Amino acid sequence: MRMLLFKIFMSPRKIFNWLLVMFSQKFRLINTLGTPVHCYIETASYCNLRCPMCLKVQKGYEFENRNMMMDQFKLIMDQIGKNAITLRLWNFGEPFINSETIDMVNYASRFHVITVISTNGLLISPSLADKIVNSKLDFLIVSFDGGTKESYEYNRRNGNFEKFITCMENLANSRGKNPSKGPFTALQFVTMNTNRGEWETIRSMAEGWHFDKIMLRQLNVVTEKGEKLSYVEQDKLQVDKTNFCSNFWQEIVFNSTGDVVPCCMDAGPEVIMGNIYEKKLHDIWNGEIYKKARQKVLKNLESIPICKYTCYKRNNKLVFD
């Protein structure tokens, strides 16, 4: 953690840009003074799973089999890297489907950004595990939503419980051989009706695989009509609705197509701000489409389609006995 703070505080430019971004957000500037501090880059658009709680699956969108090329990644990083603080290398696809993802991490490290990858873990072979551990990746999040074969394979459709166990052993073995190397690792467990009561099992397994942290998360509950899903009992759900979104000032998402969207929850995508392969970042970030979107956020967040049924769901709270 100290090294991550060192990355940020050794860059006056990043700090200054962050101050500009927060000033722009505080005073609701339509033409923002800074550039995005939190960035998503989708290295692969395809996913090997079909999880029922995934927005892309829920809405019936196809998973296109597209990988971002290294030169495309560099084009983006060369524009965002000097000011960005965090970089998440995924969106709706599985990042390790792209064989160049770790090479992209290593390139991004030149810009002293905090790099994060979230994966379903099913592609972590012994060789990939070694590559991860020897990379410059800062955080690795592995999603594991079932402590039994039944619950795991229900929540992670197309997944294989035994294969996941093997992949985690691959990662643990590689980390054991290189204890001073590798990213900070977290096992993420999303709590749902289908896996309630498995917390102790998950914790025991995570400790056996030597994860640094266990992340207990709530399910983001979204349908086009704003209905509550059956994955969470309705009487266990509390909705904390908001009418403002900081993403339009702080965050940006680059899909593998080059399309720029304001939110990682836009599965379509439905709200496209421009294409980074066709325009410069500044022309998109403070372009007419983005400025009009910020005006809508200030007047009525729900006038933006994806925000109406998505944004406030981030604050849903699960309350269990």
Image: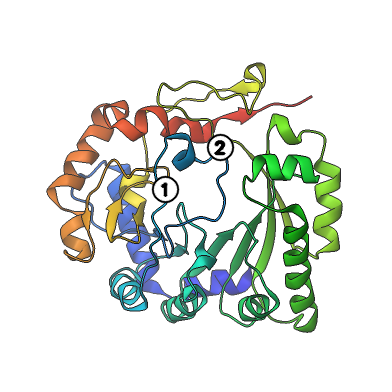
Residue at the image point whose x is 69% and y is 26% from the top = 319
Quarter of the figure with residue 155: top right
SS type, badge 1 = loop
Q: Give the label on residue 158, or none.
A: none
Badge 2 element: loop
Residue ID for mark 2:
53
Image coordinates of residue 260 in percent, x first then y, are 28, 54
Q: Where does the C terminus fall, quadrant-wise?
A: top right
Q: Looking at the rendered structure, which numbered label has been put on residue 264? A: 1
Amino acid type, callout 2: Met
Q: Earlier in the sequence, mark 1 or mark 2?
A: 2
Residue 183 percent coordinates (x, y) = 64, 72
Residue 268 left/right relative to 176: left
Residue 27 quadrant: top left
Q: Residue at x 61, y 24 (%)?
A: 230
Task: Name the one closer to the observer, 312 or 37.
Answer: 312
72 on left or right of 59: left
Q: Nearer the viewer, residue 216 or 60?
A: 60
- Local crowd at mark 1 within 10 Å, few (<14), some, or many (≥20)? many
Q: Quadrant of the N terminus?
A: bottom right
Residue lying at 54% horizontally and 74% vertically, measured from the top left: 6
- Whole-angstrom CA distance, mark 1 to mark 2, is 15 Å
Residue 308 at x, y percent in the picture = 36, 27
